[in-house]
Amino acid sequence: MGKVITIYHGSNQIIETPVFGGGRKNNDFGLGFYCTENNDLAKEWAVSSLQDGFSNRYTLDTENMRILNLNSSEYTILNWMSVLVEHRLFSIKTPVARRAKRYLTDTFGINVNAYDLIIGYRADDSYFDYAEAFLNNAITVEQLSQAMRLGKLGEQIVLKSKFAFQMLKYEGFEPADKNVYYVLRKARDEKASQMYLSIQEEESDGLYIQDIIRGGITNDDPRIPRNLSQ
């Protein structure tokens, strides 16, 4: 990542001045301004089946920022999961899921509010279902990692601090046509869902969340997949 980057925010509105502290606290990484370096991906996120949207373009000076890159080799997929379970609303269907949420937070948790900027994958549509299945002991951590690579999962960049918002400069917008970008978004999700079904059919002797809890497994265990971007 260069010092000055161009990022895009998909929305049903034109947003010239993003507001620090706005948005929804139950997003993947909590409150923040969610962007991507991929303009087409922002357009997919901007539209619905009924409504066109906009890709808002910004430049961001990242010099001197505290950056958490969850896709780097320093972190595992369970660091990403721990951030999700802290902020997103999961369906906790079993006692093991309740224990899993506590274990992930206690063992793999990261204080995302200590950073100006976060880089990590977006748990959208099917991908959130995969994370929920893992939490409920339905798939292994290896299957979760494999599933998260399906369908060209999108990487997001999230502004968390006042300092990051101050370094953001609005550069304009482009319209996003729902007849183009909703079709692309739906096709991406459907492809990922079909491939995920094939993963579920495969037998796995890997690590389920219950195995991870019982074994007291931590981030340095080589069996935990790292670096989602690879």
Image: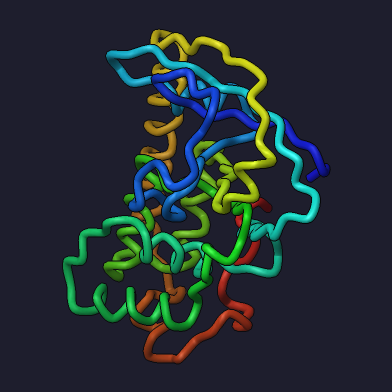
Between 39 and 226, the one lying in front of the other is: 39
Which residue of the protein is positioned furthest toward the bottom in this rendering?
215
Where is residue 171? Give x, y as percent.
Answer: 67, 20
Which image quarter: residue 114? bottom right
Look at the picture and state if 65 lies above or below 34: below
Residue 63 horizontal side relative to residue 181, left or right: right
| Residue 12, quarter of the rendered image | top left
Task: Name which residue lies at 50% across and 21% down.
Answer: 43
- Image point (51%, 40%), residue name: 34
Nearer to me, 140 or 31: 31
Q: Is residue 227 shown left or right of residue 54? A: right
Closest to the observer, 8 or 161: 161
Q: In terms of image quadrants, where is residue 139?
A: bottom left
Tell me the quarter of the image containing the N terminus: top right
- Write the residue at 33% across / 74% down: 101
Compared to 12, does 118 lie above or below?
Answer: below
Q: Position of residue 50 (x, y in %)?
A: 28, 14
Instruction: Give percent across and percent down for residue 70.
Output: 61, 59
Vertical position of residue 111 compared to residue 149: above or below = below
Decide: is 191 above or below 89.
Answer: above
